Amino acid sequence: MEFTADVIKTLPPYLFSIFEKRKEELKKKGVDVIDFGIGSPDLPPPAFVIDRLKRELDNPANYAYSPYIGIKEFRQAVADFYKREYGVDLDPDTEVLTLIGSKEGIVHLLQAVVNPGETVLVPDPGFQAYWKAVHLVKGEGYNYPLNEKNGYQPEFENIPEDVYKRTKFMFLNYPSNPTAATTTLDVFEEAVRLAKKYRFIVSNDSAYSFITFTDEVQPSILQAEGAKEVAVEFGSLSKIYNMAGMRIGYIVGNKDIIKALATLKSNVDTCQFIPIQQAAATALNSDRQFVAELNRIYKERRDAMVEGLKAIGIDIRPPEATFYIWAPVKEGYTTEQFTAKLMEEAGIIVTPGTAFGPAGEGYFRISLTKPVEKIREAIERLKRLDWQD
């Protein structure tokens, strides 16, 4: 008897689960593995967030079901955050929805708004979850390439008009995973203009919005004129407040799109544990001091890794955002050969660029979620490798 649906049988395994298995195999062989693969923060949330969580755990009322759309305190905190940081007004009751992490929201949103066979525009290279979401709704994905020469910005003019005409949804992701690219409001304004013209939904995944190393605040797509007519934006507390395991995020923007997602979610989950939402509200209502210190730490790690990569002949510009480095593999290697060499000969795990789409060939991604000491140790291992010339 066959129990598995075809859509699941044809769903490729999640890359990082494969890495985790290989990591355990290496450990059993006595290898001291340094894992720069998955982007899971190694630092704790702010003390004031943990304190709020602890206090709320003692309140028996908090063990009831959450409202399906999330508690008002959290949704109001998101709205206040957008007003304070971007000057964007949001109705917390209709234009904000609580998510169990933005990855969950991405997959469920496509289920709520995309029909089988409809076209979804996906960045290449781009976050794996976008393609998995398209697959699960039996949509037609269309890769729009991002390239280094253009600063990994969308080249909207290179997407054929017949593709735009059949498009239902477009993913944007700035600051970008995996490329660490930032963008400007002009890009969001053009995306909104095209979405209005061709009547599709455009979303920006802003999970890394405040992990930046410049004084410039990365824009929100909702700052683009008329964005609420066609656009939504995903946010997460996983990266900017180190709350990854708490699984808390949000979607903001067009109320009809959010209503569709809320309808689906009310039938498949009952939102996140109330104390986690309360702790997240405390985080969003705080000043930027914690995030500034976090960025200082990531900048120190970034600089150490960039310096080390240059020492083995990989010359890159330091990224201006996220805690990733997107770098070319050493000359003479394919992506698969390079990443395999690091794993097998140095016990270092990095993510092959091809995990993020065909345009990732020739690149790899490093997650800066290890202390500077580990980064320097990894660099010393790389220097000892026998590199072919």
Image: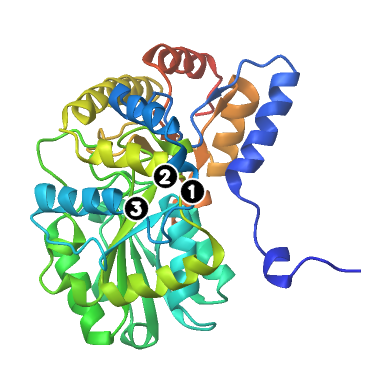
Cα–Cα span, label 3 and label 1: 12 Å
Colour pattern: rainbow
Cα–Cα span, label 3 and label 2: 7 Å
Which three-letter amino acid code belongs to the residue tagged 2? Ile
Dots 3, 1 in contact, CB < 8 A: no
Which three-letter amino acid code belongs to the residue tagged 1? Ala
**Disc 1 packing (10 Å; few <14; some 14–19; many ≥20):** few
Dots 2, 1 in contact, CB < 8 A: yes
Residue 358 visible: no
- Secondary structure category for the residue under label 1: loop
Q: Residue furthest right?
A: 1
- Secondary structure category for the residue under label 3: loop
Q: Which mark is residue 64?
A: 1
In this picture, residue 168 sits left or right of residue 19? left
The one nearer the camera, 186 or 360, is 186
Of the two numbered discs 2 and 1 in the rendering, the one whose residue sits closer to the viewer: 1
Q: Is residue 260 above or below residue 358?
A: below
Q: Which residue is mark 3?
A: 71
Q: Which residue is mark 2?
A: 274
Q: Is residue 60 above or below residue 141?
A: above
Which three-letter amino acid code belongs to the residue tagged 3? Ile
Locate the N terminus by quadrant: bottom right
The one nearer the camera, 361 or 54, is 54
Dots 3, 2 in contact, CB < 8 A: yes
- Secondary structure category for the residue under label 2: helix
Residue 353 visible: yes
**Disc 3 packing (10 Å; few <14; some 14–19; many ≥20):** many
Q: Residue furthest front?
A: 60
